[in-house]
Every structure is written in C-alpha cells, then in structure tokens.
Image: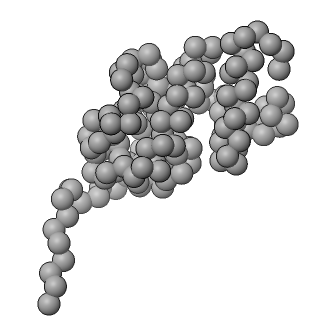
C-alpha cells in the first residue's frame, strides 16, 4: 500500500476576505523592492509578501487581484501567505501586472490605480481596463501609457 506523502506546508486556512482585508492601508508602490522585477525573486514567503505589497499598494481587493493574475482567491491567499509555490505561468502574469502598475504609478497616484482598473473607460470602447487584461489586450493599456508619457493624443 502506498502512503500519502506529507504536505510540506501548513493546512489551508479560511481565506474568506474579512472587512479588515479590504480596509488595510495602502502601501506606496515605490516601496516595492528595486529588484522586484527579477523572476528569481519569486519563491515562498518572500514572493508572497511581494504579491501582498503590490495588491495593497494599488488598493485592489483579493477577489479582483486574483482575477487579474488568473488564480482563485484561495490560491492567491496561499501565495500571499507563502503556503504554495508559484507556478511559472502565475509568475509571468504577476510580473507583467507588476510592471504595468509601476509604469502607471509614474503617471497617476498608486491608490487611484485600483479604482481606475475597475471603471469603464471611453478610451477603451467602454471596457474596464480589467476586462482588457482578462481578454488578453494588455497591449492597449501599454499603448495608453506610452501615449501619456510621450504627450501624444489618445
């Protein structure tokens, strides 16, 4: 008979967002570590803190941030707490979103990013920026950042 291997992480906790989770103070996006873009900085508890820091800095609830990086809320909570290793696909999506947030924070206040992502925008044919991310049209958001940085009309 085969024995079930022991899990190397603590059992999952209830990760249902509490009012405290939503009311956490935002952290300035420039507080993120300068080497945050290194894909090698993505393991265990250190990476979980990096995810949590970005989520709080752009003022996104766990439910919405989970949608952005295409994971469940439970998985996101496990990543944030360092209980689950991050897959290469999740790491790639996180780094892309992190880079986008850093670029956008050069133009707008970081705490405005979360609400902006969730509002319909005429510049995107009435779609919410989050919907563009979900549809795989991140290039349209990068084009907007390029236009704003260079002073070109939208």
139 with respect to 24 (left or right): right
If the image is split into quadrants, where does the N terminus sit?
Answer: bottom left
User: Is any atom of residue 108 visible in this view?
Assistant: yes
Residue nearest the observer in this picture, 107 or 60: 107
16 with respect to 97 (left or right): left
The image shows residue 35 at horizontal and vertical percentages of 36, 23
The image shows residue 62 at horizontal and vertical percentages of 48, 43
Residue found 60% across the figure and 26% down from its top? 113
Q: Is residue 88 above or below residue 107?
A: below
User: Is any atom of residue 62 visible in this view?
Assistant: no
Please identify the residue farthest to the bottom as the structure is shown. Answer: 1
Residue found 27% across the figure and 43% down from its top? 44
Instruction: State how many labels appear.
Output: 0
Residue nearest the observer in this picture, 19 or 10: 10
Residue nearest the observer in this picture, 63 or 20: 63
Residue found 18% across the figure and 77% down from its top? 4
Q: Is residue 113 above or below residue 120?
A: above
Residue 103: name its quadrant. top right
21 with respect to 97 (left or right): left
Please identify the residue farthest to the top as the structure is shown. Answer: 151
Residue nearest the observer in this picture, 22 or 87: 87
Q: State how the image is colored.
A: one colour
If the image is split into quadrants, where does the C terminus sit?
Answer: top right
Residue found 32% across the figure and 34% down from its top? 41
The image shows residue 87 at horizontal and vertical percentages of 39, 52
The image shows residue 11 at horizontal and vertical percentages of 24, 60
């Amino acid at each position: 008979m085969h024995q079930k291997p022991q899990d190397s992480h603590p059992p999952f906790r209830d990760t249902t967002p509490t009012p405290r989770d939503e009311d956490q103070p935002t952290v300035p996006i420039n507080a993120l570590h300068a080497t945050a873009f290194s894909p090698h900085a993505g393991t265990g508890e250190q990476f979980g803190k990096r995810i949590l820091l970005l989520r709080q800095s752009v003022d996104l609830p766990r439910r919405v941030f989970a949608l952005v990086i295409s994971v469940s809320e439970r998985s996101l909570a496990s990543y944030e707490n360092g209980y689950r290793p991050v897959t290469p696909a999740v790491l790639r999506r996180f780094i892309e979103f992190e880079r986008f947030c850093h670029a956008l924070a050069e133009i707008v206040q970081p705490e405005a990013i979360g609400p902006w992502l969730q509002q319909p925008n005429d510049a995107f044919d009435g779609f919410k920026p989050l919907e563009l991310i979900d549809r795989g049209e991140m290039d349209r958001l990068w084009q907007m950042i390029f236009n704003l940085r260079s002073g070109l009309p939208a």
